[in-house]
Every structure is written in structure tokens, then in C-alpha cells.
């Protein structure tokens, strides 16, 4: 699927886990909860994040007007251990991958910190 959007970080899971947490913080995304054994960060989009990325507002609007029923701005960053690398994807609160322009933007922002 051409729209499927995820990152492959060329580092093992423990290192990717630490660095992803730092990257989320630097981006201004609030980590509400985390479950390391499941590889999940539960994040919320903050005012700080929205202000910092105002010029990219078009894709943010598409993120919030997506099929999300509750529209809370809460999402899951999912890390999957692949041995020497780690797959990072954006999911809705029900654990379904989000594959749209908005997820590509957000993962692209994360990637800048995970290079």
C-alpha cells in the first residue's frame, strides 16, 4: 500500500525506544503514557506542538478531521523490534495504523531526530 507510512530506524529496540521518547519531547508532543514491553507511546498533540508547526496547518487539520471518532488528538507511536532495526508507526487510539499525509508529516518530523 503506497499510503502505508512508517519509519525504519537502523538501531536496536532499546536505543530506538530511548531516542523516540526524547524526540517526542523535543517535538512538543505530550507523552501521556508508555508501555515499553508493548513498544507503545501514548501521545497527545499539544498547543505548543500546534503553534510550532502552524505553517503545516493543512496536514494537521487532516489529522484531526480524520476518521477518529473522538477527535481528542490522542495517538499511539508504535515501535516494533526487528532485530538490528526498529519499525516506528503512528496509530489511532484503537491500535490501527494511520496511513495518510498527516502521519507521513509527523513521522518525517520524528525521523529528523532519529537519524
Image (tube, rainbow, N blue to C red):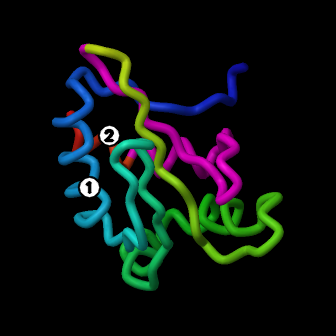
- For image coordinates 49% across by 73% down, the residue present is 45
Nearest the eye: 13 or 102: 13
Which mark lies nearer to you, 1 or 2?
A: 1
Badge 1: few (under 14), some or many (20 or more) residues near its Cα, within 10 Å? some
Image spot of residue 109 (x, y percent): 37, 49
SS of the residue at dot 2? helix
Write down the residue under mark 1: 21
Within 10 angstroms of label 2, few (less than 14), some, or many (20 or more) residues? Answer: some
Examine the structure image and report whether residue 95 is included in the region drawn in magenta: yes
Q: Earlier in the sequence, mark 1 or mark 2?
A: 1
Contact? badges 1 and 2 (CB < 8 Å): no
Mark 2 lies on residue: 111
Q: Secondary structure at mark 1?
A: helix
Quadrant where the image shows the N terminus:
top right
- Report whether 42 appears left or right of 59: left
Q: Residue at x 41, y 37 (%)?
A: 79
Residue 25 location in percent, x, y? Answer: 26, 66
Quarter-of-image position of residue 51: bottom left
Could you give the CA–CA distance between mark 1 and mark 2, rounded to whole angstroms? 12 Å
| Residue 13 place in picture, x, y as percent | 26, 31
Residue 16 to residue 4: above or below: below
What residue span does the magenta drawing correspond to? Answer: 84-108
101 to 115, vertically: above or below:
below
Amino acid at each position: 500500500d503506497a499510503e502505508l507510512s512508517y519509519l525504519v530506524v537502523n538501531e536496536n529496540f532499546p536505543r530506538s525506544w530511548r531516542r523516540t521518547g526524547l524526540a517526542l519531547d523535543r517535538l512538543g508532543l505530550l507523552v501521556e503514557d508508555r508501555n515499553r514491553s508493548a513498544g507503545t507511546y501514548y501521545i497527545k498533540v499539544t498547543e505548543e506542538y500546534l503553534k510550532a508547526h502552524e505553517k503545516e496547518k493543512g496536514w494537521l487539520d487532516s489529522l484531526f478531521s480524520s476518521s477518529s471518532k473522538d477527535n481528542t488528538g490522542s495517538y499511539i507511536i508504535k515501535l516494533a523490534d526487528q532485530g538490528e532495526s526498529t519499525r516506528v508507526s503512528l496509530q489511532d487510539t484503537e491500535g490501527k495504523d494511520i496511513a495518510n499525509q498527516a502521519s507521513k508529516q509527523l513521522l518525517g518530523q520524528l525521523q529528523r531526530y532519529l537519524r
